[in-house]
Image: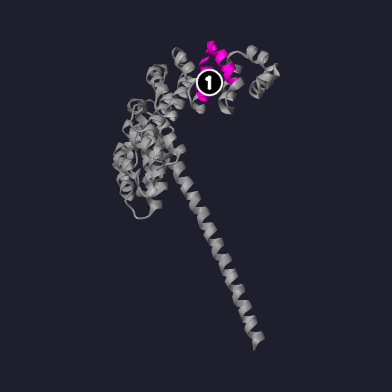
Amino acid sequence: MNLTALVWAALAITAAGSLSAYLLSVRRIYLVRSDRRHLAGQERLALVAVQLADGELPEADLTEADVELVAELLARYSRQLTGAARFNIADFFECHGLVGREVSHLSDRRSWRRARAAFLLGDMSSPQALDPLLAALDDPSREVRSAAARSLGLLGSGQAVEPLVHALVERRVPRAIGGQALLSLGSEALGPLRPLVLHAEPDVRAAAVELVGLLGDPGDARLLTGRLRDSAAEVRAKAARALGRLGAEETTAELREALRDRIGFVRANAAVALGLVGDRASASALLEMARSDEFDPAQAAARALSRLYPELLWSAARDRTSGPHLAEAADLTAAAR
């Protein structure tokens, strides 16, 4: 009796395994065919998507399924297009109610659905999504906030600058995503960013100074030079680095003064900036810093000297009492030649 039961159990297990294998095989065939139909549909409608991006109306009426496929194609194109094409893409999504659909999904109880909607709205390029996405920066879910930040960067509106800066400073969005969103705004961000350089909160000032240094031009040097005397060390350091990026030669006297800042990482950033600007007049001050300052400022000064005055660097490095930073910078400079 026990043997018979074991035999039947073995047969049942075998049958169940065979059924599972069969069902998996059927599902795999279904998914492969579904993917093929999806790709074939996109190939069929690629020309229609291009026509719509160019502002032309397609000759044939689109079915509901066709609209979804064209929407996928246009969302992909919108990440690479600018100007009128993005307006045309936005018109398509608005006219077919797709913007409104995804905006409504921002209120869904499921965080993954809200995050997906926030992500898709950026690719739809519609200004109608701006206010809902700004509100989504306060969503309880970090994934939703991150998707909203990314999409706000794609929409290209200066209205998003200050909310994005605050979300970045308050760590409501990851630094990489918030920073990239602001950089994606490009020159549109500069107008709203410049007043934030004087904001009451030092963290906001620091973020704004860094972004102006990345997006601005030498005309912003005067605004940033004043931040070399900011009460917050982080702001002073970022101002020095930003002036170096902008190549602001007229600020070299202020940057040389910053070499005497009481905070080490501010001195280090001032040294880096002088190297980037190409101020050979600061060579003697940088040499002294490289010999006697603490690790980070001394290392930064030695490397700045290697850019400005390599002959002086090599001469000083021969003196073994000059310290390790000059010797290291001299070796790196020689190896690069």
Any part of residue 65 in sight: no
Count of numbered labels shown in the rendering = 1
Magenta stretch: includes residue 68: no
Q: Is residue 166 visible?
A: yes
Instruction: Work out whether 178 lies above or below 255.
Output: below
Q: Looking at the picture, how far across and down is residue 61, in whole percent?
A: 33, 43
**Residue type beneath disc 1:** Ala
Q: Looking at the figure, which quarter contains the C terminus? A: top right
Mark 1, other Cα within 10 Å: few <14 / some 14–19 / many ≥20: many
**Residue in the foreground of this view, choosing between 173 and 118:** 173
Residue in the image at 60% along x and 74% along y: 13
Residue at the spot x=70%, y=19% of the render? 320
Residue 280 inside the magenta-drawn segment: yes
- Write down the residue under mark 1: 271
- The image shows residue 63 at horizontal and vertical percentages of 35, 47
- Image side of residue 93 versus residue 324, left or right: left
* Residue placed most toward the observer, 217 or 169: 169
Q: Residue at x 31, y 51 (%)?
A: 107
Residue 198 is situated, as x and y percent measured from the top left of the image, at 34, 26
Depth check: give the residue in front, 108 or 1: 108
Q: Identify the residue shown where x is 66% and y is 15%.
A: 316
Nearer-the-camera pick, 156 or 87: 156
Find the magenta span and give its range: 267-290
